[in-house]
Amino acid sequence: MLHFIARTLWLFWSWIELTLFTLFLYTLAWLPRKLTNRFYTRLFYSWCRVFVRALGVVLRLHEKNIQPLPKQYILVANHPSAFEDIGIPALFPVYPLAKMGVKSWFLVGKISEAAGTLFVKRDDPASRRAVKEQIIAAVEEGKNVVIFPEGGCKGRRIYKRFHYGAFDISLRTGVPILPVFLHYEMQDRFEWRDPQTLIDKFWHFMTAQNNHANYYVYDAINPTDFSDEKEYSEYVLKQFLQWQQRYLD
């Protein structure tokens, strides 16, 4: 009983903290970019960490890498849930890629846009081509980006194929792929399924009996080891399937 009361009070305070931080970032998001570019993204990463706490999720980073992480990378991860949209920026300094619908979300859309999130209409080839060039430009500026090569939330198991975009960008820019395997211990509560809403998922996260999220980071993969994006993509997919068998099957 005491544990329940303590957790309830902690979550209550976390949501107050998140609300105040959200309103602060939302206000800053309306200022000219030239005034906020130098610090807004760092505030966004802190906001993601506060958001994780408010949802009551225990987010753990497992460093399975042997070599030090490169100074710049293209992070690729599986995408079983909506949680990784804040979970990954809470742990890694990356610029996210999100579906266009996120841009219209109340408060969050404006904050995400101001933080440098790139938006794409997944079913629009022209939009995919345009955002790919934007990602290349961001990478060439020295930024880290995160891409979900499954092309959206495909469920708790790895989808049958990875799209080539992240791997083509890696080959064209020479920036390595950093693979991160995401594992939610209570998969049924975290998995994104239609027609669930974002509010539904927040409630699922907060009421999960097992609220642990494990993010496993492995050694970066150098693009010079591959001749084309197809070979590159299939190799990385094979690695993710091996990690899936290790942690989920």
Image (cartoon, grey):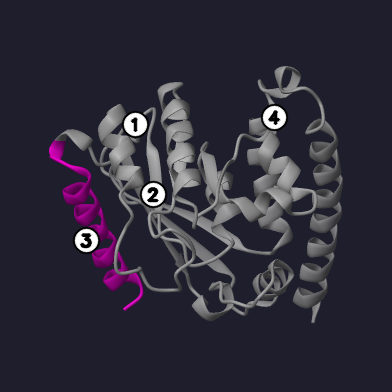
In what quadrant of the picture does the N terminus appear? Answer: bottom right
State the separation of the CA atoms marked 3 and 1. Answer: 22 Å
Which mark, by number, is residue 40?
Answer: 4
Q: Position of residue 43 (x, y in %)?
A: 69, 34
Discs 1/2, front: 2
State the separation of the CA atoms marked 3 and 4. Answer: 37 Å
Judged left or right of residue 31, residue 216 is left
Relative height, residue 170 to residue 71 (above, below) = below
Task: Answer whether residue 226 is magenta in the image.
Answer: yes
- Other residues around mark 3 within 10 Å, as few (<14) / some (14–19) / many (≥20): few
Query: Circle 3 — which element?
Result: helix
Query: Circle 4 — which element?
Result: helix
Q: Amino acid at mark 2?
A: Val
State the separation of the CA atoms marked 4 and 1. Answer: 23 Å
The number of numbered badges drawn on the structure is 4
Q: Which residues are magenta?
A: 225-249
Judged left or right of residue 160, residue 139 is right
Whether residue 105 is visible here, answered yes or no, is: yes
Query: Badge 1 is on which residue?
Result: 70
Query: Circle 2 — which element?
Result: strand
Q: Amino acid at mark 1?
A: Pro
Query: Badge 2 is on which residue?
Result: 76
Q: Amino acid at mark 4?
A: Tyr
Query: Badge 3 is on which residue?
Result: 238
Query: Circle 1 — which element?
Result: loop
- Other residues around mark 1 within 10 Å, as few (<14) / some (14–19) / many (≥20): few
Earlier in the chain: of badge 3 and badge 4, it is 4
Q: Amino acid at mark 3?
A: Lys
State the separation of the CA atoms marked 1 and 2. Answer: 14 Å
Does the CB distance between marks 3 and 4 fall below 8 Å?
A: no
Earlier in the chain: of badge 2 and badge 4, it is 4
